[in-house]
Image (cartoon, rainbow, N blue to C red):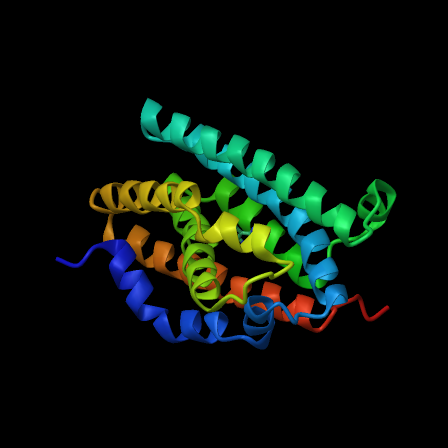
Amino acid sequence: MTSFTQTAWQANLPLFETTRDMPFNRELAEGVLPPEKFRHYIIQDAHYLEGFARSLAFVAAKGWDADHIVQFAKAAEVTIIVERELHADYFERFGVSPQDFASAELSQVCNHYVSYLQATCAQAPFEVGLAALLPCFWIYREVGRAIHESAATNNSYSAWIETYAGEDFSEAVDAVIATLDSVAARCSARSIERMHLAYRRSAQLEWMFWDSADRLESWPL
Ligand SMILES: Cc1ncc(CO)c(N)n1
């Protein structure tokens, strides 16, 4: 039997390929992404990662056993540590002061994605929250690797690329995939259906997140 994660990946493959091939990611690989677009992205992503870490903490609290609690509480911690390292560096380079960041409102898409993740992880069963979190790990690794393969040397975005194409992140992704498959093996058909919907929604929101940075999205009023 095909695993939950392989089924979800295959079912959403065209969506992933569209995400991987977005102009934003191609330009990031070539090092020609306009700085104001990366600045928009990195500010929103710092907000996003805080919500992502909170979502991981909700999922940790719902774990079926102690290993789950450790895995997701640790992932919440690592998310904040990496967010601080990556963003402190880029905030300085792109001239984002602590005040700029504090006063930057979440964009429509960032707000939607974070609200969706937090609500799902807080209110839905453990396995559904986990499925909603998987694209955040897996799509980032695969996009990171694709960008890494085609990246120009001397790319000002290399710290970002190395983080998501790197070994530490990949191990965390493999661990989430393994946990989700072992959990899915004990879930009802009804739960599996909800998990696929949650996975797809997050995969869509990953595309939308990059797209919103590409459009320098702001609120219409
Ligand atoms: C929007 C988004 N999704 C996933 C990650 C990586 O977990 C990230 N940094 N930003």
Q: Which residue shows up at 49% across the image and 43% down it?
A: 121
Residue 143 vs residue 93: left or right?
A: left
Task: Tell me residue 13's x, y (percent).
Answer: 35, 71
- Quadrant the N terminus occupies: bottom left
Does residue 85 lie above or below 146 as drawn?
Answer: above
Query: What residue appears at the point 62 percent right and 71 percent down from the top-left corner?
Result: 211
Residue appearing at x 51%, y 48% in the figure: 163
Residue 168 is situated, as x and y percent measured from the top left of the image, at 42, 40
Location of residue 1 with respect to 86 vertically, above or below: below
For residue 190, which quarter of the picture?
A: bottom left
Observer-nearest of 54 and 156: 156
In the image, residue 98 above or below residue 211:
above
Left or right: where 104 falls relative to 119: right
Query: Which quarter of the image is occupied by the C terminus?
Result: bottom right
Nearer to me, 36 or 134 = 36
Q: Looking at the image, which residue sits at the far front?
A: 154
Q: At which x and y percent is residue 141?
A: 43, 55
Q: How many marks?
A: 0
Q: From the viewer's perspective, tell me whether residue 157 is left or right of residue 139.
A: right
Residue 158's place in the image compared with 21, above or below, is above
Residue drawn at point x = 29 percent, y = 68 percent: 10
Most foreground residue, 159 or 191: 159
Indicate the position of residue 177 as horizontal and vertical percent values. Answer: 31, 47
Q: Residue farthest to the left?
A: 1
